[in-house]
Image (cartoon, rainbow, N blue to C red):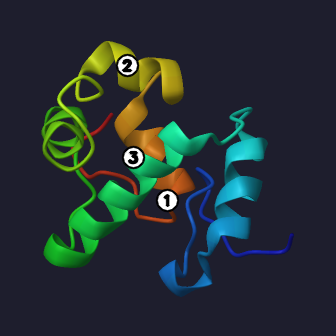
Amino acid sequence: MNLATDKDGYLKHLGDWNPEVAAWLAQSVGVVLTDEHWEVINALRAFYEDTGVSPAMRILVKIVKQKVSIDKGNSIHLLTLFPDNPAKLASKIAGLPRPTNCL
């Protein structure tokens, strides 16, 4: 797939995103998307559409608690889906900009 990304692999043009692109982005970082991944991605994209913000971890946990389920809205669960840094990795796969307050 030939898409414009920045040096960290985030899409340069948010309009290039679609589910096929998400699968490609996920594969590029070693993630195989499941229904649980899609729940988080869809909640994240809806939040971004409403706010224009790619959230950091604390807000991502809150979003997942509210929009997906209280059981899935915790750091440990999100780390199993999106290893190392769920906020950054989920935003990348969701085709959103890098969260500004993530190192």
Amino acid type assigned to the residue bearing label 1 in the image: Ala
Q: Is 69 on the left or on the right of 9, as rendered?
A: left
Position of residue 60 relative to residue 1, above or below, is: above
Q: Secondary structure at mark 3?
A: helix
Q: Earlier in the sequence, mark 2 or mark 3?
A: 3
- Drawn side of residue 90 relative to residue 33, left or right: left
Kindly identify which residue carries mark 3: 40
Which type of secondary structure does the marked residue at label 2 adopt?
Answer: helix
Q: Pick out the residue farthest to the right.
A: 1
Whether label 2 touches label 3, CB < 8 Å: no
Quadrant of the frame with the C terminus: top left
Separation of marks 2 and 3 at Cα, in angstroms: 11 Å
Which image quadrant for residue 88? Answer: top left
Label 1, label 2: how far apart the Cα atoms are: 18 Å
Locate residue 9: give its quadrant. Answer: bottom right
Amino acid type shown at disc 2 = His
Residue occupying the point 35% across, 65% down = 45
Q: Can residue 83 be seen in this snapshot?
A: no
**First in residue order: circle 3 vs circle 1:** 3
Q: Which residue is mark 1?
A: 94
Label annotation for residue 77: 2
Let me know if residue 30 appears in the view: yes
Callout 2 crowding tier (Cα within 10 Å): few <14, some 14–19, many ≥20:
some
Q: Position of residue 54 (x, y in %)?
A: 28, 58
Distance Cα–Cα, label 3 vs label 1:
9 Å
Q: Position of residue 35 (x, y in %)?
A: 55, 43
